[in-house]
Amino acid sequence: MKITSIKSHVLRYELEKELGYSQQYYKHRTAHLVEVQTDDGITGWGECFGPGNIALANKFIVEKVIQPLILGEDPLNKEHIWQKVYNLLRDSGQKGMPIQALSGIDIALWDILGKKTSAPLYQLLGGKCNNDVPVYGYGMMLQKKSADELIDLFKEESKQIKSKNFKAMKMKVGLGPKEDLKLVQAVRDSIGKDFKLMVDANHAYNLKDALYVGKGLDELGIYWFEEPVAPEDYEGYRELKQKINTSIAGGEAEFTKYGWNKLISNKCIDIAQPEVCGLGGITEYLKVAALAQANFIPVINHVWGSAISIAVNLHLLTAQPDMPGGLFPSKSMLEFDTTEKNIFITDLPKEEFSILDQVKNNNGFASVTENIGIGINPDENFIKEFEVNE
């Protein structure tokens, strides 16, 4: 079997309202799918992390940079392909967009392996460690409104997320240290003191401000404080981890086993959040997860994107052992977008695929199907309707 072509599909549509996080507001939702075709008729699907025009840059890398390197290769030789591409791009792309582009291709190769062997992805990863996976909802994105207006919006949205049976929820911050703590306090009051609440700063703070916010979060019983400082600031992460009680989570902007080794060896995080569609794909994710496990750091994947990303992560978490294990272990959770309806999740797959229904009907849990590969395939007509041709 040989790789005959690699196609990149950037999808986009306009949101009804502008949403944002600490770094920017955005009006369009984007997804970047990768399609790898073979000479025996098997097609694999993957996804690249990277919103907006970053997806267009990654499309060029997928089709014009990486594709010529691996046409004619056996798609089952995933490790060889990964190392070949990384070595040839190493001088120019040890992190960032080249690795995001490689991630989507690698995921598609695993999908091909599943389809070739008639096995669901989780079986290829070692089988089931979990019959189902708890799911948390992330919403409460920033909007161009006053702090008081956001407080009212977040209080209402948090109640809605809780009512849908999610096991926990995550909110954005980024207005400023004092305003952010008021926002978190309002959500905590809205959902009660015993419901798991996580706070995501998207590296909005310097160390001093992160310490101020972190100590405030200690008083509010926050489950984790995500990306408090810039991903390059290993010393800041380490000091923050030492000085506050709330768990520090991070890693969505870290790449490959090399970057993750530095993040972990510097004792920066309590919770690892690898992004499989960005760090190098499933092949590299497994090595990152092993690094985290060897250092007894829980892995709770970062999940952003379409139904393909969600399906892949559900398989990864199904195959993930408890850390450290026991009769009543703390389970890793699947992150799920609860903001304005995301048609790249609801309408993209040909197959029946609804995390929301599972969460509602199964008291906050979701489980994989026995479909082969990653378990879903995108609707070609849907792709044609929303594909960006630039």
Image (cartoon, rainbow, N blue to C red):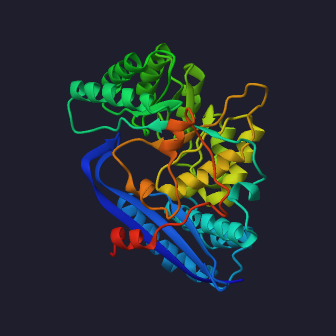
Q: Quadrant of residue 337?
A: top left
Q: Percent position (x, y) of residue 125?
A: 74, 55
Which residue appears at 67% of the width and 63% of the height?
372
Quadrant in the picture for the C terminus: bottom left
Left or right, 105 with reference to 297: left
- Above or below for 24 versus 66: above
Asked whether residue 321 appears in the rendered view, the answer is yes
Q: Position of residue 351 (x, y in %)?
A: 53, 61
Compared with 16, 161 (above or below) is: above
Is residue 229 left or right of 182 when viewed as pictured? right
Can you tell which quarter of the image residue 189 is in? top left
Quarter of the N terminus within the rendering: bottom right
Q: Nearer the viewer, residue 4 or 230?
A: 4
Report the number of numbered marks.
Answer: 0
Q: Is residue 14 left or right of residue 301?
A: left
Q: Is residue 386 above or below residue 339?
A: below
Report the side of 94 relative to 170 (left or right): right
- Residue drawn at 50 percent across, 65 percent down: 350
Could one spot residue 231 in this view of the protein?
no
Location of residue 146 by image quarter: top left
Q: Position of residue 371 (x, y in %)?
A: 65, 60
